[in-house]
């Protein structure tokens, strides 16, 4: 089975889809690199992929991120 991963941030879909969960998480880390390097920032982004096909990430300041795993249909 083949899948792709979308990132949804506060209800807005990222422009690109990713081949792996790890690539999607890395895209979030790159986008928020400066913020994540702050000393007192609260975040929860280094989490394992959820078995529900939807993994929730959080970065302080109201940044809620969903990584959605979607099956590629071969019809």
Image: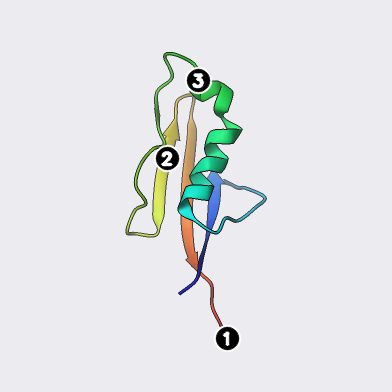
Labels 3 and 1: the sequence-earlier one: 3
Q: Quadrant of residue 42?
A: top left
Placement of the C terminus among the 4 image quadrants: bottom right
- Other-residue count near label 3 (Cα within 10 Å), few / some / many at <14 / 14–19 / ≥20: few
Which labelled disc corresponds to residue 75? 1
**Front-lying residue, 40 or 19:** 19
Labels 1 and 2: the sequence-earlier one: 2
Q: Are marks 3 and 2 in contact (CB under 8 Å)?
A: no
Q: CA distance from mark 3 to mark 2?
A: 16 Å
Instruction: Give the vertical position of 63 relative to 34 (above or below).
Output: below
- Other-residue count near label 2 (Cα within 10 Å), few / some / many at <14 / 14–19 / ≥20: some
Q: CA distance from mark 3 to mark 1?
A: 44 Å
Mark 3 lies on residue? 37
Residue sticking out furthest to the bottom: 75
Residue 8 visible within the image: yes
- Other-residue count near label 1 (Cα within 10 Å), few / some / many at <14 / 14–19 / ≥20: few
Image x and y of residue 63, in percent: 50, 32
In the structure shown, which secondary structural element does the residue marked by tag 1 occupy?
Answer: loop
Image x and y of residue 11, in percent: 55, 45
**Residue found 34% across the figure and 53% down from its top:** 50
**Residue found 54% across the figure and 78% down from its top:** 73
Coloring applied to the structure: rainbow
Instruction: Give the vertical position of 67 relative to 26 (above or below).
Output: below
In the structure shown, which secondary structural element does the residue marked by tag 2 occupy?
Answer: strand
Instruction: State which mark lies toward you, 3 or 1.
Output: 3
Instruction: State which mark lies toward you, 3 or 2.
Output: 3
Q: CA distance from mark 1 to mark 2?
A: 32 Å
**Residue found 44% across the figure and 13% down from its top:** 39
Image x and y of residue 14, in percent: 62, 48
Mark 2 lies on residue? 57
Image x and y of residue 49, in percent: 37, 51
């Amino acid at each position: 089975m083949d899948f792709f991963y979308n990132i949804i941030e506060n209800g807005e879909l990222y422009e690109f889809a990713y081949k792996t969960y790890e690539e999607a998480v890395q895209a979030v880390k790159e986008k928020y690199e400066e913020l994540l390097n702050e000393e007192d920032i609260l975040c929860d982004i280094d989490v394992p992929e959820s078995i529900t096909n939807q993994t929730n990430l959080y970065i302080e300041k109201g940044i809620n991120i969903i990584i959605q795993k979607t099956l590629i249909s071969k019809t």
